[in-house]
Structures are given as structure tokens and as C-alpha cells.
Amino acid sequence: MKVTGYMAGQADRLDATFAALADPTRRAILARLAIGDATVSELASPFAMSQPAISKHLKVLERAGLISRRREAQRRPCHLEGQQLRMVVDWLEPYRSCWAESYDQFERLLDTLQADDNATDQ
């Protein structure tokens, strides 16, 4: 299925966002940036990888619109861009009712099984 017009651009951004979120290192970087802005060296410190490797991850996150970088004298702190994550949440929202119904059905099944188990034990 080919998407055209406005939706094509939105679909491309969503694809890039999910691709960026697919990597555990990038998710950890986003979790760190949720606390506050950080430099490349600050982001690299908890990982057993080089700053150039972290920089590659940052480029993926930046292309996906999940982070931005700005220049402050010699520093280039990274900043979490929440708007792009909002797009993911908005995309997932229609599925929430489906998941909720599945959980409700599962809970009813567990209740039935427990009641049967309790009846058998008595």
C-alpha cells in the first residue's frame, strides 16, 4: 500500500521513529535525556562504546526528530524532543481499546478458572 500526500510524510517520520526506538542503546539514551540535556560524553559514559559510536546513535535519533542538538560555546548538548514521541502515542491510541478488551477477556477467563479451581478444591 502506497501512502501519498501529507500522510506519506507522517508515515515516513513514524517509520524513522520506530526504527530509532528499535535499538536498546538509543532507548537508553532517550531515557537519560528525559532527565535533562546531556553532552555526547555524558551520554557515552554508561556505555562500553566509543563516543563516535554514540554519535552515530545520536544521528539516528536526530534524523527521527527524537532529539535536537544546539551549540553552547564548546558544548553541544542534546535535548529530548517530546513532540515526536507524542506522534507515536497518538498513532498507538486507537489500539488501546482493543488491548483493554483483550485484557478484560483474559481477566474474566482467569476469574472463571480460579472459581473452577476453588470449587474443585472444596
Image: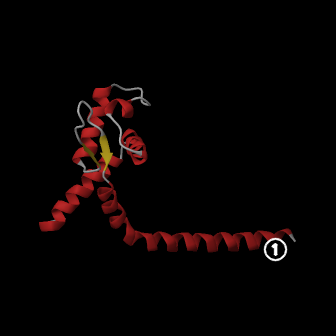
Q: Nearer the viewer, residue 105 or 80?
A: 80
* Label 1 residue SS: helix
Coordinates of residue 94 in the picture (x, y in percent): 37, 72
Q: How many marks?
A: 1
**In the image, what residue occupies the spot 38% across and 32% down?**
42
Report which quarter residue 5 is drawn in: bottom left
Coordinates of residue 20 in the picture (x, y in percent): 31, 46
**In the image, what residue occupies the spot 15% across and 67% down?**
6
Q: Nearer the viewer, residue 73 or 56?
A: 73
Quarter of the image with the C terminus is bottom right
Instruction: Using residue 67 as the reference point, say whether residue 120 is left or right of it.
Output: right
Q: Residue farthest to the left?
A: 5
Q: Residues within 10 Å of mark 1 (few under 14, many from 20)?
A: few
Q: Amino acid at mark 1?
A: Ala
Q: Nearer the viewer, residue 69 or 24?
A: 69
Coordinates of residue 98 in the picture (x, y in percent): 45, 72
Q: Does residue 57 appear in the picture of this structure?
A: yes
Q: Which residue position holds label 1? A: 119
Q: Is residue 84 above or below residue 32?
A: below
Quarter of the image with the N terminus is bottom left
Q: Does residue 2 appear in the picture of this structure?
A: no
Q: Is residue 25 above or below residue 117?
A: above
Report which quarter residue 55 is drawn in: top left
Q: Residue farthest to the front?
A: 73
Coordinates of residue 76 in the picture (x, y in percent): 26, 36
